[in-house]
Amino acid sequence: MTSRISNALARLFTKHRIVFWYDDKQELRNDFETLELEDVKKVEIDNNEFSLKHILLRDDHKSRFLVYKEGDQPEPVKNWLYDIELANTVFKTDQNAIWLNELELPSEFAEIVQQHAAFFEPEGKIKEAVSQAEERRVTLKNLIESDDTLSRVRLKMLAIATGAKQKGDVRLDVALERLIAENAEGKTYKFIERCNLHHFLWEQVNNHYGYQSDSPSVMDFVFELFKYCYCAELPSGLQGVSQDSDAAKLQNMTNNALVFFKRWKDSRTHQETFEWLSEQCSNSMKIEDDLQHRSLKDILDLDYFRVIDKKVIHELVNGVANRTLSQGEVALWCRQRRQGHWYKDFELLYDAVDVASQFFALLDTTKLDMSSASEAVQSYTRQWFKLDQLYRKYIYALKASSQHSLLSSLTEQIENLYINNYVQPLTNGWQQHVNYMDKWQVSGVDPQSRFFNKYVETNYLNKNKKVCVIISDAFRYEAGEEMVSRIRQEDRYEAKLNHALSSLPSYTQLGMASLLPQSKEYPLRLADSKGTVFMGELSTQGTDNRDKVLKTIHGERASAIQAKELLEMNQINSRELLKANDVLYIYHNRIDHAGDKMQSEGEAFEATERTFDDLIKLIKKLANANANNLVITADHGFIYQNSALDDSDYSAKDVEGEIVYNDRRFVLGKNLSAGRSFKTFTAEQLGVTGDVHAVIPKGIQRMRLSGSGSRFVHGGASLQETIIPIISINKKRSSDITMVEVEVLRSGSSVITSGQISVTLYQVEAVTDKIQPRKLRLGIYTESGKLISDSHTVDVDLTSENAREREMKLRFLLNQEADSANHQEVILKLEEPVAGTNQWEEYKQLRYTIKRSFTSDFDF
């Protein structure tokens, strides 16, 4: 007790010269007599009031005095020293007074410790409880400021009860978030009740958010909050909420409730709690039933319940399938939903709907006219390939989402249109030109066999530049086009796309051999068995044999390696490998590995997605090993359909002769003859030596092959199988990535006169590979940095060349704290994330002045 008394007295003497101490219970004399305070004189009242007064005011009017009396404090009319007491202070030794003194609060705050004693005292005498109580008192003392009111101190106590440690957490919304996170009526709320702070809590919730209830609870507040925020942004109220007490509750709630709700919803800390409670409220409020009567446009801005996204997607699927929504509308609305809370859960479905809409729109405008083989290749590499690309993206999203029932109508349409209105007409038209070929070549299109000479030797080796070649098995042209965009989005990387005509048949052995350096001394030759390809007498099967071919034809400073082996190398070994070679061939096989097996052919498009990631890793691995020049290409492409094939999709095996090797899309052999549904090419027409030649089914038909799949095939002459990408990549020394610029367009004047304000973000230029999107967080703040509105986090990533289509409208709701900024300047801040952290830094700001009349708070 002595130390606490001495500490309390020491604090009082920092503000007062004289301190009176009345020991009303007459039990602290020993403490008084043993007490030692520096530069403080101790005197005692014992029928000597007049002489003491003379000493205190005349004889020693500068010294500090502790005036002690054993007994009660006299009534003012009988207290000769009352005037001195009033000019100084009285030290009280009851527990409440000691707590008040510890907090350095004047006597006007006595009710704080009287009414909320449980906050200050431990619950029981166990060490942990005593420590917790002491920590609460210390935290409160550190947070108290000289101008605090009773209400402000109570708010700080409430905040501390919910776990606050610092000034920034002394906010009603923070306390509520923590209470909600405890599943409403847990240990923390019971402690608040024990501290008698719950009445204050609900009084503040009423004042700030308009929540009223005869028996308030955290869970009831949460349910009313969800209900109010859902109804506030809809043209009509929630079904089942009539003009009774429930409706009155909703009418009482304010914009502050909406601001709080959005902050809580978007908080990473409370994400799990929000989602669990959202599900509970959705079931209780029968949101699914209510959404049956809502239009798509009514709910596009809402993301309070997971079922809203289900409704939006359902409507988008039907709209796209029935062609009642335009491609532009679908793209805009899918993009709009990206800002929603549940978007990540449904991203694949939004992608599927968006891609399906693009597919239909593109197919409607595509004309598959081709007057020559050259024109066909030119049209395919400029535009037609996009239908293959969109089909791949749709099927990938369909399979990755596993929502086959939901998307069944879209899937059926896309599948039928892709095969019947695109692949078959395209291939049939192309086949007309193939039929008349007396040699497998297309005017103006490089054959695959020229790859090394043109893209390796001429472009790099002849200029004394090293080059790395990545060959990804079955990486077809449409994937290569997407890969170029992904590479260009990486800082300091430039990529250019070309194409070539693969060797025929379009299968791995021949394609890989054609990409090696060609030499008259080592001509390509189809073997008499198993489809193996030789260069002279050198086998080209497998990485080791291709390494031998490279070294034999080009020299010892050429090597071949598997991509997996390279990725597993450390930096020292990878740099040594590149230092020892002028040309390095790297073989990657994920797509063909999946597609060529009956059990996994349906995973071909998933394998394509993973290939993109693999290739980016390889590029960066090579760049870190000091490779500046890279080329990516493929041995062949493929055709794929997700649906099962009909019997009519198979060719009768109308082939005679000495068959050496056969697959689903070609036959190799000697002296072969075939029916009208096949095209025969001699070895010379194929550009190889020997007497082994090939028979290719016309169109997209397959030949039956036991134990083999049929949906993923290659080897034939279709454009998808034979047009391969050639991507030339260069690493630059300086950064070439910029972030898109954003401006704020005011909607009207710079004066805020109501409880909300609308602004328009204008994206200065379209997003491209090298002009990348910005993520921005926007809110309205006071000069002191206090957020007085809701906050929006947006991705500025529009790709339209039309300036009017690069505008984004936002609405900000002011909260109750904005009242304190009336007639003051406030700041609309645009912040962007600091890379690699959870921090934000200012990007831009715009100043406004709040001038709100009292009538602006009325809704009528």
Image (cartoon, rainbow, N blue to C red):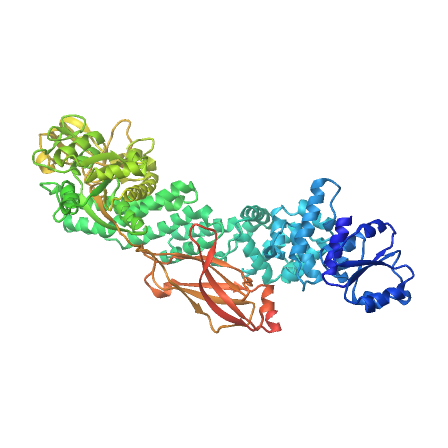
Comparing 780 with 266, the one in front is 780
Left/right placement of residue 326 relative to residue 658 reads right
Task: Please give the count of numbered marks on the rendered protein.
Answer: 0
Residue 596, position as x, y percentages in the image: 28, 33
Q: Residue 859: tell me if it is visible.
A: no
Residue 421, position as x, y percentages in the image: 27, 47
Residue under the image location 70 percent in, 61 percent down: 151
Q: Quadrant of the C terminus?
A: bottom right
Left/right placement of residue 392 relative to residue 76 reads left
Comparing 288 with 337, the one in front is 337
Q: Residue 32: tell me if it is visible.
A: yes
Comparing 856 with 586, the one in front is 586
- Place residue 852 in its image quadrant: bottom right
Residue under the image location 59 percent in, 49 percent down: 281
Residue 703, position as x, y percentages in the image: 23, 32
- Place residue 773 in its image quadrant: bottom left
- Place residue 859 in its image quadrant: bottom right
Left/right placement of residue 417 relative to residue 311 reads left
Residue under the image location 54 percent in, 52 percent down: 265
**Whether residue 858 is situated above or below residue 93 in the rendered picture:** below
Left/right placement of residue 640 relative to residue 835 reads left
Comparing 364 with 180, the one in front is 180
Residue 203, position as x, y percentages in the image: 69, 59
Residue under the image location 75 percent in, 41 percent down: 125
